[in-house]
Image (spheres, grey):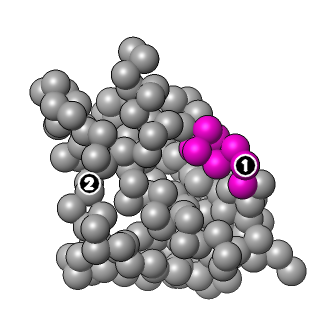
């Protein structure tokens, strides 16, 4: 049985913190779907297609990682792609409290899907998409927080 996981998020934009979690998860799973969730409560800075393209570029040489856009409940999308794991990154204790609540709800909805938490590298704990978006909006240099592929794309615009 293949170990398939979904790493859901908005990834607006893709940061080095996101890439760190994915890179360290690659040896743990046979396939990782990076799921760009459509959340009607959020107004993203970058289109879902742009975020998906960033992941495709970053992982073009890694066949285990696929980027997708999905809508609806995460557990339902897991069933659709055959994922039995949900991957989540944790930076701080407060992240764990929030993520555990979601994991408990997902477990209630489907007891066959397990949430796996990976803690971020300490050097990426301050990297949050919200902060990076604010830097970009205000004309600052967000490059220390972004993968090269994202930086090149932003500079080309």
Q: The C terminus lies in which quarter of the figure?
A: top left
Left or right of 79 on screen, residue 36: left
Residue sitting nearer the eye, 13 or 111: 13
Which span of residues is magenta-colored? 55-62
Write down the quadrant of residue 40 in the picture: top left
Taking the spot 73% from the left edge, 65% from the top edge, the residue there is 31
The x, y position of residue 121, in whole percent, is 35, 73
Local packing at callout 2 (Cα closer than 10 Å; few below 14, some 14-19, many 20+) is: some
Position in image of residue 6 (x %, y %): 61, 63
Q: Quadrant of residue 62?
A: bottom right
Mark 2 or mark 1: name the one nearer the start of the chain.
Answer: 1
- Residue most extreme to the left: 138
User: Could you tell me which residue is drawn at 63 percent across and 75 percent down?
Assistant: 85
Where residue 130 appears, x then y in whole percent?
23, 46
Q: Secondary structure at mark 1?
A: loop
Residue occupied by mark 1: 61
Badge 2 marks a residue whose secondary structure is loop
In the image as oriented, which residue stretches furthest toward the right? 1
Crowd around label 1: few <14 · some 14–19 · many ≥20 (10 Å): few
Looking at the image, can residue 124 be seen? yes
Q: Nearer the viewer, residue 106 or 34?
A: 34
Instruction: Give the residue drawn at x 28%, y 68%.
Output: 123
- Report the front residue among 148 and 136: 148
Asked whether residue 75 is drawn in magenta, I would say no
- What residue would you read off at disc 2? 128
Q: Is residue 131 above or below residue 31?
A: above
Q: Quadrant of the N terminus?
A: bottom right
């Amino acid at each position: 049985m293949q170990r398939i996981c979904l790493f859901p998020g908005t990834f607006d934009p893709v940061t080095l913190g996101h890439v760190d979690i994915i890179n360290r998860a690659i040896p743990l799973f046979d396939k990782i779907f990076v799921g760009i969730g459509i959340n009607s409560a959020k107004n993203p800075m970058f289109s879902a297609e742009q975020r998906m393209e960033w992941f495709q570029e970053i992982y073009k040489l890694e066949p285990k990682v696929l980027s997708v856009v999905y809508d609806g409940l995460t557990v339902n999308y897991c069933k659709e792609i055959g994922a039995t794991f949900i991957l989540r990154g944790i930076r701080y204790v407060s992240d764990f409290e929030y993520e555990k609540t979601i994991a408990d709800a997902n477990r209630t909805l489907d007891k066959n899907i397990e949430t796996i938490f990976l803690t971020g590298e300490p050097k990426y704990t301050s990297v949050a998409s919200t902060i990076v978006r604010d830097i970009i909006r205000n004309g600052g240099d967000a490059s220390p927080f972004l993968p090269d592929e994202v930086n090149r794309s932003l500079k080309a615009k």
